[in-house]
Amino acid sequence: MAMSDKKILGEMKKGKKLIKTKRGGLPSNGIIEVFCGSMYSGKSRELIRIIDVVKIARQNVIVFKPEIDNRSGNRDVVSHNKDKVSSVVVKTAKEIIKKSSKYDVIGIDEAQFFDNEIIDVVNELANSGRRIIITGLDMDYRGKPFGPIPNLMAIADSVQKLKAVCSVCTRPAQFSFRIDSSNKQVLIGAYGKYQALCRSCFTERQKNF
């Protein structure tokens, strides 16, 4: 959101560098927000909720998702409870810069599927005064850091780790356990391929799978 005139003058007096947006002309500080967690933790739902609020405020907003995520079969970002928002499908992170020049708020869903180029892209956008909202899996099915998400968490202004409900014991779950036999790190899917598990149940399942 734009800073008040009084605050702008105060920042200028302190000698702080303010970034001008390309759209409104008023100085604005960019921000990177990351929402991460396991499967079924409500990451996309949180993105959709924020985008709805941003639209009510009449801010210019656009949402991107990687081409590899074809679960919904269309260009929408769709949560597991069927909430949805329109998005632009891109093959590479660099396309986001080209297609977001007119927007103040930029959503990026399933960011774990981008390569490390997304880190520089997000920094560039935030440094130009944009609000960037990112969602993604922080760990893969083995419980290992997934793609660029750890680095995006490191550069973020705020990070929220969302949790699902363990499908075994109903405690808070932060792991995505794969029940499919594939050993590929990237396996697109949800129901029938993954379970959300707490640490205890995940560790036990890992021993026996």
Image (cartoon, rainbow, N blue to C red):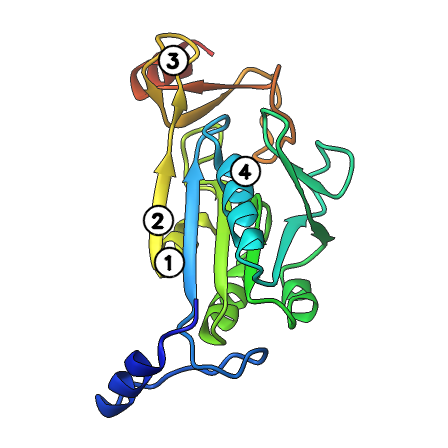
How many dots with numbers? 4
Vertically, is 84 above or below 13?
above
Residue that numbered label 2 is attached to: 159
- At 29% from the left and 79% from the top, the residue drawn is 7
Report if the CB atoms under discs 4 and 2 are less than 8 Å apart.
no
Which numbered mark, 3 or 2, is in the foreground of this view?
A: 2
- Image position, residue 3 (x, y; %): 37, 74
Q: Between marks 4 and 1, how big is the CA–CA gap?
A: 18 Å
Q: CA distance from mark 1 to mark 3?
A: 34 Å
3D distance between C-alphas at marks 4 and 2: 15 Å
Q: What's the mark number on residue 207?
A: 3
Q: Which residue is mark 4?
A: 44
Q: Amino acid at mark 2?
A: Val
**Mark 4, other Cα within 10 Å: few <14 / some 14–19 / many ≥20:** many
Say what amino acid the circle numbered 4 marks: Ser
Residue 193 in the image: state x and y as whole percent.
60, 19
**Badge 4 or badge 2: first in the primary sequence:** 4
Counting other residues with Cα less than 10 Å from the Cα at mark 1, is it few (<14), some (14-19), or many (20 or more)?
A: some
List the residue tagged with mark 1: 156
- Residue at mark 3 to residue at mark 4: CA–CA distance: 30 Å
Question: Mark 2 falls on what kind of element?
Answer: strand
Is residue 111 in view? Answer: no
x%, y% of residue 158?
34, 54
Label 4: element kind? helix
* Label whose residue precedes the other's in the sequence (3 or 2): 2
Give the mark toward the camera: 1 or 3.
Answer: 1
In which quadrant will I find the N terminus?
Answer: bottom left
Q: Amino acid at mark 3?
A: Lys
